[in-house]
Amino acid sequence: MLDKELEIIEKLENGETLTKIAKEKGFPSLSQIYKCMRSDDALHRRITKAREVGSYSHLDKIQDMLSEPQDPKYFQQQREAAHHARWLASKLLSNTFGDKMKSEIKQDQKITISWKNNKKHEIEDKPLETSLLVDSK
């Protein structure tokens, strides 16, 4: 478990990046966080889940930014931020914001072959009789 695990998770859920968090004074380095994640599956799941929640926070921030009047000088920058947020959501939150619909089809993989009549066909184990026909001309 990391020393500042709860703070890291809270910051991730608020939309901060792990890289930015790791650069802050008093927090473990990015490589140390990844090392802990590799050795602790539960920590890995918690950080991954916090990043997903953080993606929603990031989308909220972009939505708030776009809903307020902005200086036209920064229009392209805001547009790029919104485009990046959409792209990020489509990758991290593909179940909700993905371009492709996922559908699961569960079906029985068993195949049954049957015949209409239930007559049994048996093959007799008899030697084959061969005859040689010779034309005597």
Image (cartoon, rainbow, N blue to C red):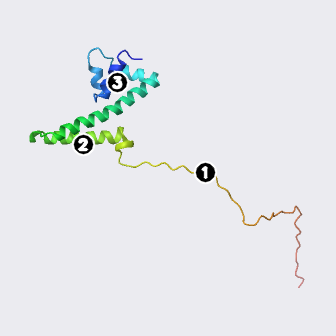
Residue 40 sits above or below residue 67 on the image: above
Q: Position of residue 98 (x, y in %)?
A: 36, 45
Question: Disc 2 to disc 1, how far (Cα)?
Answer: 43 Å
Disc 3 marks which residue?
9
Q: Amino acid at mark 2?
A: His
Q: How many numbered circles are shown? A: 3
Disc 2 marks which residue?
83
Q: Which residue is at the front of the view, 113 or 60? A: 60
Would residue 18 be seen by someone viewing this image from the given angle?
no
Q: Is residue 103 left or right of residue 16?
A: right
The quadrant where residue 10 appears: top left
Residue 135 sits above or below residue 57 on the image: below
Q: Amino acid at mark 3?
A: Ile
Q: Secondary structure at mark 2?
A: helix
State the quadrant of the C terminus: bottom right
Question: Disc 3 to disc 2, how far (Cα)?
Answer: 25 Å
Q: Secondary structure at mark 1?
A: loop
Disc 1 marks which residue?
109
Residue 134 sits above or below residue 127 on the image: below
Q: Nearer the viewer, mark 3 or mark 2?
A: 3
